[in-house]
Image (tube, grey):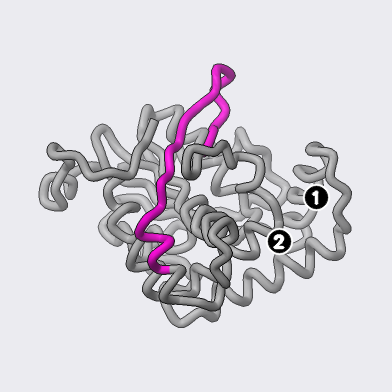
Amino acid sequence: MFGWRKKKNQTTETESSGIPVITLDGPSGSGKGTIARRVADALGYHLLDSGALYRLVALAAEDACVALQNSDNLTEVAMQLDVRFDSNPEGDEVVWLNGEDVTQRLRTEQTGAGASKVAQIPAVRDALFERQRAFRKAPGLVADGRDMGTQVFPDAPLKIYLTASAEERAKRRHKQLKDKGLDVSLAALSRDIEDRDRRDSERTVAPLKPAMDARFLDTTGQTIESVTQTVLDWVAEL
């Protein structure tokens, strides 16, 4: 279980610098969230789903009737997030916002689109920066997102950039939504993924791009097990 309030014994930046971090960056649908969780479980490390933070800001803004174009109010929303990550008895992640279970709302296409928009606002990113770094605790951290290796944990000993073809990423998302009983056009998903890729790559602050020392991993056509094993093999080389 993770909380956001700073604790008196919270690890300082100097103390945490020796704690290993594995960063997994890449575009939407590349598989980084699934792989990050598998790797964290295998290593017994903490997990940071940085994308969830931006989705939560978008949800909190929606609940507070704050427009996604209102940078000042959005920044205030980001600073005041009342969030808790938990797990149910089956081991599945449960996310709470202001005391409400928002796990299902968090993963909708609408929330994802909102997250992509709020992530372009520098003040919002600044408000969430230290919260992300606070996840760096012993014995180690697996952090997934879009700027984990370039901005948040530039000293991580292993930085990985996951990618996959746009067609494959759209098919994966389409299957996820169908499994949830949602009927979404594959063509519409493909357009949405292309739009999000463009926004994430062209934003002026912390754009989506691989770190200079990142290792590339194309997950197109690969199984979750094979990709996870590749990452674990790279960890073993450290």
Which-is-in-front pick, marks 1 and 2?
1
Task: Answer few, some or many: residues within 10 Å of disc 1's Cα (few below 14, many 20 plus, some between 14 and 19).
Answer: many
At x 54%, y 38%, the residue is 100
**Residue 216 visible in the displayed image:** no
Task: Answer few, some or many: residues within 10 Å of disc 2's Cα (few below 14, many 20 plus, some between 14 and 19).
Answer: some
Q: Which label belongs to residue 174?
A: 1
What is the x, y in percent for residue 205? 42, 77
Which residue is tagged 2? 165
Real-space CA distance between mark 1 and mark 2, rounded to the nearest whole angstrom: 14 Å
Direction from residue 99 to residue 105 in the image, left or right = right
What is the x, y in percent for residue 90? 58, 19
- 128 or 22: nearer the viewer: 128
First of labels 1, 2 by sequence position? 2
- 117 or 65: nearer the viewer: 65
Amino acid type, mark 2: Ser
Q: Split into 4 quadrants, where in the image is the N terminus? A: top left
What is the x, y in percent for residue 88? 54, 23
Q: Which label belongs to residue 46?
A: none
Q: Split into 4 quadrants, where in the image is the C terminus? A: top left
Q: Is residue 46 above or below residue 78?
A: above
Task: Residue 91: say if magenta.
Answer: yes
Task: Residue 64: say if magenta.
Answer: no
Q: Which residues are magenta?
A: 75-95
What is the x, y in percent for residue 199? 59, 76
**Residue 125 visible in the displayed image:** yes
At x 63%, y 50%, the residue is 219
